[in-house]
Image: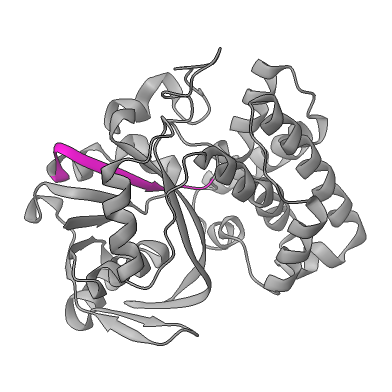
Amino acid sequence: MRVAVLGAGAIGAYVGAALHRAGADVHLVARGPHLAAMRRHGVHVISPRGDFTARAHATDDPADIGPVDYVFLGLKANSYAACGPLIEPLLGATTAVVAAQNGIPWWYFHRHGGPHDGHRVESVDPGGAVSAVLAPERAVGCVVYAATELEGPGVVRHLEGTRFSVGEPDRSVSARCRVFSDAMREGGLKCPVEPELRNDIWLKLLGNISFNPISALARATMRQMCLHGGTREVIEIMMTETLAVARSLGCEVGVSIERRLAGAERVGDHRTSTLQDLERGKPLELDVLLAAVVELAEITGVPVPTLRTVYAISDLLALRTAA
């Protein structure tokens, strides 16, 4: 099985290292000191489950790799529309794109069925720019329940979680999902094939839509947000509104808000990816987390006043950061 990891950062390099350990033909696409370190020493994973090193091929030029069976997309969603020159050399006739994305994916209504089947979510696929680069037919959804950080160039610290749920937009249990799942499991990760992956999308989003923007606005860790009475209340309201939108689209999360908050508190003083991006001066990934849900609330007629308010404030922060 040939796999290219496009965007071999903390999550991408961790997945690539696991697949390489399973015997897959893995190619990591990265740049800068991280790429140089992976070329010299491979990917070194530090994990409570055991440290290991994977010496997979690493490059900054996808043309060196050519067509693969799977592209594991580790890029931020806000860079998808511009990734055409990078991903095109990797695509063959049957290449699947496994998008490890937070929030609402560009393919959300592809083969969804019902009144919204085929609807384009403008916030995440403006003018069809992402679909033009990443055809929805290639998409295999992936919801990540793992926390990793780049401790240094070529060094990934695995903090917790090993689950990467995958699924087809049309809810089928396809051969390409099963093959990918088997390889991930052989590499030591959990990778269930979920026919109703959209439920997982909303479960993950329940935390991201609230903790990520609030963490950036307050410069706070997960534990700090949960222990502060005011932010905890705002987060509970945001989660309640998010669940209402999910239910309007036929999705059930199956986890209570209190349980979700308790799980976040146990994570401790972890900084969300949005806070880390803010601290590094990188673009904030808010469209797929907040703007998309506000847009879905509009088409389903669900009131989300708190989500709208937090989005307005965090969007201004994102614009100022970009400037």
Relative depth, front residue between 313 and 29: 29
Q: Quadrant of residue 25?
A: bottom left
Relative depth, front residue between 253 and 84: 253
User: Magenta region's main secondary structure?
Assistant: strand
Measured as percent of width and height from the top left, residue 8 is found at 31, 62
Q: Residue at 46%, 84% (x, y): give it.
A: 49
Measured as percent of width and height from the top left, residue 296 is found at 63, 24
Check the image and report above or below for 94 versus 256: above
- Answer whether residue 147 is visible to the viewer in this image: yes
Measured as percent of width and height from the top left, residue 67 is found at 11, 46
Q: Is residue 321 left or right of residue 8?
A: right
Measured as percent of width and height from the top left, residue 170 is found at 41, 29
Q: Which residues are magenta?
A: 90-102
Q: Residue at 71%, 48% (x, y): give it.
A: 210
Relative depth, front residue between 279 and 140: 140
Is residue 135 rendered magenta in the image?
A: no
